[in-house]
Image (cartoon, grey):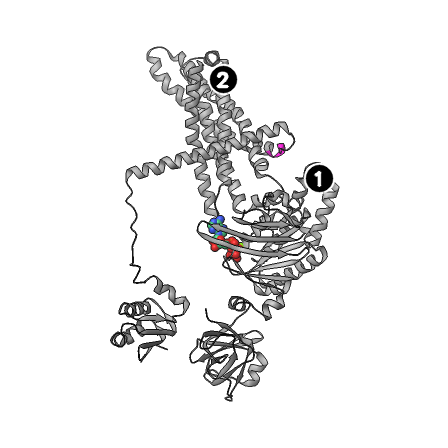
Amino acid sequence: MSIAINAISKRFGDFVALDNLQLDIASGELLALLGPSGCGKTTLLRIIAGLETPDQGQILFHGEDATDTHVRERQVGFVFQHYALFRHMTVFENVAFGLRVRPKKTRPSETEIKRKVHELLSLVQLDWLADRYPAQLSGGQRQRIALARALAVEPKVLLLDEPFGALDTKVRKELRRWLRRLHDEMHITSVFVTHDQEEALEVADRVVVMNKGKIEQIGTPEQVYDAPATPFVYQFLGDVNLFHSRVHDGWAEVGAARFAAEAGDSDKAVVYVRPHEIELSRVATDKAIAGVISHSRLLGATVRLEVDVKDAEVVEVELTRERYQEGGWQVGEPVWLNPREARVYPAA
Amino acid sequence: MSAELIVGPDTLQLRGRLDAGGAAAIWAQARSAVTAGCVVDASGVDYCDGAGSALLFDLIQRGARVDGLPERYAALLADLNPDKPLTVQSPKPHGIADELADFGKAVTSEFTLTMAFIGVFTADIARIFTARGKIRWRNGFAVASSAGADALPIIALVAFLFGVILSFQSAVPMRQFGAELFVADLVGLSLVRELAPLMTAILLAGRTGAAFAAELGTMKVNEEINALVTLGLDPFRFLVIPRLLAVALIMPMLTVCAEVIGLAGMALVMASFDVPLATSLHRATAIVGFSDFFGGLGKSMVFGFFIAAIGCLRGLRTGAGAAAVGESTTRAVVSSIVMLVVVDGLFAVMFYILGW
Ligand SMILES: Nc1ncnc2c1ncn2[C@@H]1O[C@H](COP(=O)(O)OP(=O)(O)OP(=O)(O)O)[C@@H](O)[C@H]1O
Ligand SMILES: [Mg+2]
């Protein structure tokens, strides 16, 4: 089922939580809502589900206005940020609940319910936990049960609020691959919220980057990573160094380095460079920035150097471990920085 | 990197860190160099705190214009805008009249809220009886059996104590008039008409009403209520109505238990005053009429509705966070007891008018 979000606004008192959002979600798509904490992701998801009413705007489900449709009739599956499993029911009962409470006419038979629940539990690979209570499960297991419960009612739309938020990196990775596979099997229109850019880029068909109640960019993971529409998107999708500069003849200058800029002459500009897109060298070239290595830190397979540069805050440079060792870089050594890629945005 | 000041014609260029040390170092020089209408270029500032903004403010007051201050520090300066004098808002003095007004508002809003809830409930009850089969009787029975059975021991204990104390305290003076036989009348009537229903209700408010508020509040906080709704259930029908009916059902039963046990306590005391068990029990049952008994039970049923309604209402209106659950629980108990007193008063007036 396709969803259209049409000029939705929501305020809490004076605070604008969502500001005139426009978003189309295609049928069968897996969409990620990405943004920092408090930017309105949960609020948007709750409005889609009908748990919250927008102050303005419309929600269309499959082209039909669903703004006034009650949650109970929207047929959405919602996986809550903190699972929200029914504590006094076993895992089996939790998953079966949505089917049990249907009116008699549409309620499946007891054997049918049993079959279905076990099918779902094996889908989330937790069949062996059917008789436990939620309190006896780990966070990741609860998360998967919550997903199975949402899927049991065969929702037309699946909404997941930070489904892997409370988990450690390893389980997260496992679960997000699993979610992707699940989506590929079932093709339910799904929206999932996250503030982890890696998760969004890895799993989603399209990514919506939000900030302060506004959408900054909508695009495929490649689009948002390779062509960030705004400085915010650029900064949010990974570490970045910034240099302040002024534009002269279409070039933003940072030390001796120059970057093509679209801003007008003598406008201020900010140059963004990602840490792994900087080359280090000991030889002065005419387009390099001079600095002194002040720190080095080993982060697993990569090494992160901090370089003090005149006119800027500390610049971070990321190297693979081999290149770091080949180069034999030392703290306190003067170096030249050569950005391979950079983006120039007019200063706000 | 500390602060640096470069003086040019009609411009001052500030660079580096404008913290207490940096600002102090260049303050005197900046002050002497500043002229009205000159531009302070602060684009090279890479740190600025209160001290730095004080310097900038000083320069502005001497007629300079600050330009290019990084946006994250501009907010500091915005509040020092000389066109907008600093104002400190002192809270309004809060007199006794205001306190009273606040209290009055709180009471009325509480009352309207509860009434609205009961209104919705009544409408729903009507719908149940017309379009049957939607209510979870099984949930209701589960709540009734657990709430009733759990409350019975404490109710029995308190009722027994009531019977004993009441009869003992009245028997001592009555004996001086040789009227200890009438203690049975007094205790029997007051237990059945007033004390047993009210005491049972207060105990149930503390136990079951609070439990409902905590239970539903926890469900609310954990978003279980929202989960119910997305699964297509109406929490009002699924959670509230079974509880209301359950409590309305067990209240009269518990009241009868309390009456019986209270009378037993009374009989025991009377036996110690040499009145035979059979005599005192006979007197007590003879004086209690049909209307006294069923009036008490009807009252207890209404009390039950209110207790459950307020408990559920408080639970469903719980805010965010675990602390909110505790708050709802307390408020549930307090509002129920206040409500019981009010409703009991209304019943007293009604019974008086009816001549029961
Ligand atoms: N019921 C409410 N009343 C007042 N303000 C609210 C309410 N719900 C949310 N907000 C505010 O709206 C903003 C957006 O909240 P929301 O829960 O959508 O954030 P989020 O993007 O999901 O953040 P997180 O990643 O931390 O979960 C927040 O600043 C929050 O304080
Ligand atoms: Mg959230």
As rendered, which of B17 and A168 lies closer to the eye?
A: B17
Residue at label 1?
A107
Residue drawn at x 29%, y 54% is B88
Give the chain of mark 1. Answer: A
* Residue matched to label 2: B293
Q: Chain of mark 2?
A: B
The amino acid pointed to by label 1 is Arg
Position of residue B206 measured from the top left corner of the image (x, y, whole percent)? 46, 34
Query: Which image quadrant is residue B60 in?
Result: bottom left
Residue at x 73% of width, y 40% of height: A110
Where B84 falls versus A263 (above or below)? Answer: above
* Label annotation for residue A30: none
Q: Is residue A319 above or below residue B251?
A: below
Task: Find the magenta span and give its range.
Answer: B135-139
Please state which amino acid type lies under the numbered disc 2: Phe
The verdict on residue B302 being magenta is no
Query: Is residue A152 left or right of B5 when viewed as pictured?
Result: right
At label 1, counting other C-alpha atoms closer than 10 Å, the crowd grade (few under 14, some 14-19, many 20 or more) is some
Q: Nearer the viewer, residue B296 or A80?
A: A80
Residue A57 image offset from top left, x and y in percent: 55, 50
Q: Residues within 10 Å of mark 2 (few under 14, many from 20)?
A: some
Q: Real-space Cα distance between discs 1 and 2?
A: 46 Å
